[in-house]
Image (cartoon, rainbow, N blue to C red):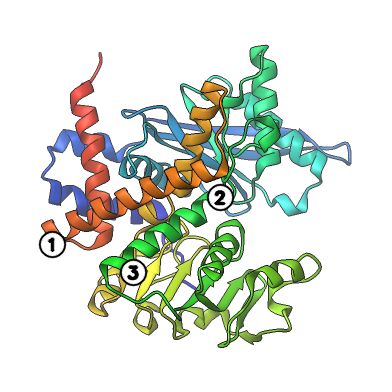
Amino acid sequence: MSTKQNVWEMTLERLDSTMSVLDLKPGVIKYLREPRRILEVSLPVKMDSGDIDIFKGYRVQHNTNRGPAKGGIRYHQDVTLDEIKALAMLMTWKCSLVNIPFGGAKGGIIVDPLKISKRELENLTRRYTYELLPFIGPEKDIPAPDVGTNAQIMAWIMDTYSIAKGYMVPGVVTGKPITLGGSQGREEATSRGAVYTLLSALKVLEIDASNLTVTVQGFGNVGSNAAKIMYDLGFKIIALSDVSGAILNRNGIDPYKLSDYMKDSTLAEYPEAEKADPGKFFETKCDIIVPAALENQITAKNAAHIKAKIIAEGANAPTTPDADPILKDNNIFVIPDILCNSGGVTVSYFEWVQGNDAYFWSKRKVNLQLRDIMEKAFYEVYEFSNKRKLGMRSAALALAVARVAEAMKIRGIYP
């Protein structure tokens, strides 16, 4: 298992090193380091037993200089305020990097959604939304699904907000069901965007895309869809992992068959692959690694054992700062999280646009528009990386931060 590092301190560490490259003034640096608004709420919920339980919830808006705040809501027992602050900041850089008119936000509730009933989950979601009413909206802050949340939860948020307003407001959230104004292609958008950046990386690195082997850590929404998309493109998926364990098959694993199997069982019990050690997952010899689980997975302790050519970061902050120089020394090409997994927020932007226009796109149009944005962002980062002699992570962050700093300077400080 990885060593848990404070993700907020890690995010600030990377930001500070990036801002030194950009030669920003001290006041601008202070401004960009601080979240604009931090909301902490206590959520009383009537449980099925008739008793009342209290849950802790957060919403952090990091920066809104380039547009309304945008970011997911996660339901997880290990949610912390520092984690939410860090993820809100990463959303600011992510939106800036792909050049969509949003700032960054993030929300979370400390709860294991698998340990409460559907009725309790709905009550919790609606109470959380009620507490957020003055702070969210299509022109203020637009939540979306994240770890432990889904389209149904977004529908409850939209309904609660709409009841309070007195009319339907589909643009208050993204990641909604299609029948309530969701976008085609949203569910697999993060995965598809990651694959588009991976294909671009293979082009610039002049690596033949045929017969490449892939390992995917995490088989949730991002990991499973990424595995399926790559499988369809001819990549060989040789190892997968999730909370139940890890599996390996050098001849390849069919992620569609695995998904079907997991409807009644766990990934670790899949009979068409052998069990593997989750603690040594990144030591598996392969061409491409897709970390698509939680943060702090690739660290100084395991980075030296990685034998892949490319790491495509489907998760947020899966690599700690002390691992970056090790990966660089070993000539491993990293597609950083704020670039690699920004397909989700990009299609969320498409959904927001479609909802505001009340005009909806085909899945083909969504995917083509996504490809254009992801490829453009990749090549901008790659060229900046070469021009400034920076790693891909530093280049991506520098580009993103520079755009936010420019917007802040142009808008000015009021009053």
| Mark pair 1, 2: CA separation | 36 Å
Give the image quarter of residue 304: bottom left
Instruction: Please tell me which residue is depicted at 59% across the width and 39% down the height of the picture.
Output: 175
Location of residue 55 with respect to 326 vertically, above or below: above
Q: Which residue is mark 2?
A: 79
Relative to 265, 288 lies left or right: left
In this figure, which residue is indicated by the disc labeled 3? 202
| Badge 2 amino acid | Val
Query: Between marks 1 and 3, how big is the CA–CA gap?
Result: 20 Å
Give the residue number, with chain letter if any, for mark 1.
Answer: 389
Foreground mark, 1 or 2, reads 1
157 left or right of 230?
right
Q: Secondary structure at mark 1?
A: loop
Q: Position of residue 321 (x, y in %)?
A: 31, 64
Q: Earlier in the sequence, mark 1 or mark 2?
A: 2
Residue 129 at x, y percent in the picture: 63, 28
In this view, the residue farthest toward the right is 49
Residue ID at (42%, 74%)? 288
Residue found 26% across the figure and 60% down from its top: 392
Apparent side of residue 53 relative to residue 21 in the rendered image (left or right)? right
Amino acid on which the number 3 mark rests in the picture: Leu
The front one of 269 and 100 is 100
Chain-order first, disc 1 or disc 3: 3
| Disc 3 packing (10 Å; few <14; some 14–19; many ≥20) | some
Q: Are marks 1 and 3 in contact (CB under 8 Å)?
A: no
| Nearer to the camera, 272 or 102 | 272
Badge 2, how many Cα within 10 Å: few under 14, some, many 20+? Answer: some
Where is residue 286, by image quadrant? bottom left
Q: Amino acid at mark 1?
A: Lys
Q: CA distance from mark 2 to mark 3?
A: 35 Å
- Determine which of the numbered discs, if any, sits on residue 26 in the image: none
Note whether residue 88 is visible: yes
